[in-house]
Image (spheres, rainbow, N blue to C red):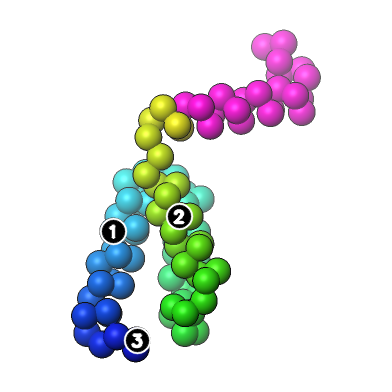
Amino acid sequence: MSSGMVGLSCYLVFVSWIGWNTWRKGSPILFAAFIAMLGFSSFHYVLRQPLFWFSILAIAESTLLTSKQNAVLQEVQQQQTRSIHPLKAIE
């Protein structure tokens, strides 16, 4: 890292916080995305790449959704499923 021990400490705390939140959220997709980003970043110097930070921050934002936002997202997903599968709408 180009910011020394302070930057490394901040990065490790930030990554640990995101990892803990993805684990607590209980979503295997979010946790797999987090692990994939960690694996990718351990073989390349990606800290200066905007796409890396966008992905990490998107994962972090997804873990912080409130239960009301989760309910809205689930309702939208159910409506999309009903529009794709008309037989499920009858049930």
In space, the residues marked 2 and 1 are separated at their CA atoms by 11 Å
SS majority, magenta: helix
Q: Residue at x 28, y 59 (%)?
A: 17
Labels 2 and 1: the sequence-earlier one: 1
* 70 left or right, relative to 79: left
| Residue 60 circle label | none
* 59 left or right, relative to 80: left
Observer-nearest residue: 28 or 76? 76
Q: Which residues are magenta?
A: 71-91
| Residue 17 circle label | 1
Circle 1 or circle 3, nearest the eye: 3
Labels 1 and 3: the sequence-earlier one: 3
Kindly identify the amino acid type of the residue bearing the numbered disc 1: Trp
Kindly identify the amino acid type of the residue bearing the numbered disc 2: Ile
Q: Residue 78 placed where, x, y %?
A: 62, 25
Tell me the element at label 3: loop
Q: Residue at x 50, y 63 (%)?
A: 54
Tell me the element at label 2: helix
Mark 3 lies on residue:
1
Image quadrant holding the N terminus, namely bottom left
Observer-nearest residue: 15 or 28? 15
Image quadrant holding the C terminus, namely top right
Mark 2 lies on residue:
59
Q: Residue at x 69, y 28 (%)?
A: 81
Q: Residue 68 placed where, x, y %?
A: 41, 27
Tell me the element at label 1: helix
31, above or below 84, in the image:
below
In space, the residues marked 3 and 2 are separated at their CA atoms by 22 Å
Observer-nearest residue: 38 or 72? 72
Is residue 20 inside the magenta stretch?
no
